[in-house]
Image (cartoon, rainbow, N blue to C red):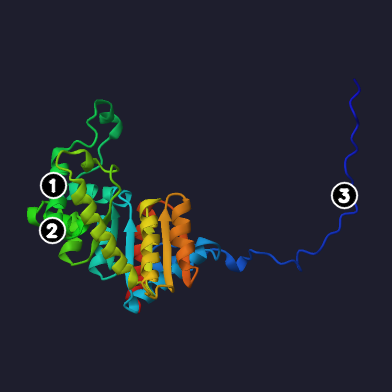
């Protein structure tokens, strides 16, 4: 069998143009500035390249600081991983500075935060205990939280408030490191949005499904009240890929349905990777009527301290 001979294409007739006359998306004017020892946060942000997040991040900081300066709320929705990587002190500082107006957590958030308050440690190694069925069976965690929830249902309050009250009542040794305990002392609302069966405390004998549902639904209504006043404010979703983006979208449609003007808002999603629901339900859909949404990808333990530093630095300069 004879191989077919293919004649290479001749490029000699290719039409060209001058690079000097061409529109280019990147110029040296967009380049980053060099870093130097002792840079301030302001100098670091100014040195970022004028590309993608290098443009978006400073703009988001400015919009956030403007909202805070105008006394508009900043609502933080966050997954439990934010607590597990050690960021409570950063968030507590922002609460004490009046930056964070309210916090929304999933069910895992109260578990890890409460264990931090009780014993100063959390996050068991699942692979070591799942085989024996011991995963999630920590006695004190289940008792403290379920008793708090059950008491909250009896008192007709929300789940977040009930847990905060219990942490203060027990006066745990690490309450100063607890997001929920500190928020309760500062009278900052914490709402907790639970999916039954997702949290270890649901397998404990002390769990009461009716109490969990009642107190979490109460918190959803509280969250809706907070969202109803979000016009001109900021909503952050940090580390929640599904649950809190869905909760935020439902709250937003409730308040708009009831006639509240919540259109000109700034939203942002911070997470390790880009997920569908945060991008759709936090960044894009809620800002179609006005405002602007941002998506930032990176490790919480790097991005959130940077975010906090940038906000605090800008606020101090006003």
Percent of width and height locating residue 251: 36, 63
Quadrant (top left/top right/bottom left/bottom right) for the C terminus: bottom left
**Mark 1 highlights which residue?**
144
Which numbered disc, 1 or 3, marks the residue that appears first in the sequence?
3
- Disc 1 and disc 3 in contact, CB within 8 angstroms: no
**Marks 3/2: CA distance?**
77 Å
**Callout 2: SS:** helix
**Mark 3 highlights which residue?**
11
Q: How many marks?
A: 3
Quadrant (top left/top right/bottom left/bottom right) for the N terminus: top right
Q: Nearer the viewer, mark 3 or mark 2?
A: 2
**Marks 1/3: CA distance?**
76 Å
**Callout 3: SS:** loop
**Mark 2 highlights which residue?**
165
Residue visible at 57% across and 64% down in the picture: 31
Residue 37: image quadrant is bottom left
- Disc 2 and disc 1 in contact, CB within 8 angstroms: no
Q: Is residue 102 left or right of residue 281?
A: left
Q: Residues within 10 Å of mark 2 (few under 14, many from 20)?
A: some
Residue visible at 71% across and 67% down in the picture: 23
Q: Nearer the viewer, mark 1 or mark 3?
A: 1
Residue visible at 51% across and 66% down in the picture: 55
Residue visible at 55% across and 66% down in the picture: 50
Disc sitting over residue 238 in the figure:
none
Residue 61: image quadrant is bottom left
Which numbered disc, 3 or 2, marks the residue that appears first in the sequence?
3
């Amino acid at each position: 069998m004879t191989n077919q001979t293919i004649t290479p294409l001749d490029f000699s007739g290719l039409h060209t143009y001058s690079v000097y006359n061409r529109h280019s998306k990147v110029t040296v004017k967009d380049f980053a500035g060099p870093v130097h020892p002792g840079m301030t946060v302001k100098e670091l942000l100014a040195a970022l390249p004028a590309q993608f997040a290098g443009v978006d991040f400073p703009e988001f900081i400015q919009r956030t600081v403007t909202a805070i300066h105008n006394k508009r709320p900043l609502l933080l929705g966050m997954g439990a991983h934010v607590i597990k990587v050690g960021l409570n002190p950063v968030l507590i500082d922002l609460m004490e500075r009046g930056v964070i107006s309210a916090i929304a957590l999933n069910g895992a958030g109260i578990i890890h935060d409460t264990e931090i308050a009780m014993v100063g440690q959390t996050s068991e190694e699942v692979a070591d205990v799942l085989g024996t069925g011991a995963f999630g069976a920590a006695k004190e965690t289940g008792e403290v939280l379920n008793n708090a929830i059950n008491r909250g249902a009896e008192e007709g309050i929300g789940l977040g408030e009930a847990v905060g009250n219990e942490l203060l009542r027990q006066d745990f040794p690490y309450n100063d490191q607890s997001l929920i305990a500190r928020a309760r002392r500062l009278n900052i609302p914490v709402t907790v949005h639970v999916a039954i069966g997702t949290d270890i405390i649901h397998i404990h004998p002390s769990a009461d499904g009716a109490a969990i549902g009642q107190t979490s639904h109460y918190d959803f209504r509280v969250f809706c009240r907070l969202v109803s006043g979000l016009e001109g404010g900021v909503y952050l979703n940090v580390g929640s890929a599904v649950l809190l983006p869905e909760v935020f979208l439902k709250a937003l449609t409730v308040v708009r349905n009831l006639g509240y003007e919540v259109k000109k808002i700034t939203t942002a999603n911070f997470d390790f990777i880009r997920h569908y629901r945060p991008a759709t339900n936090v960044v894009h859909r809620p800002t179609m009527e006005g405002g602007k949404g941002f998506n930032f990808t990176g490790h919480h333990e790097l991005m959130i301290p940077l975010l906090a530093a940038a906000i605090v630095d800008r606020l101090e300069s006003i």
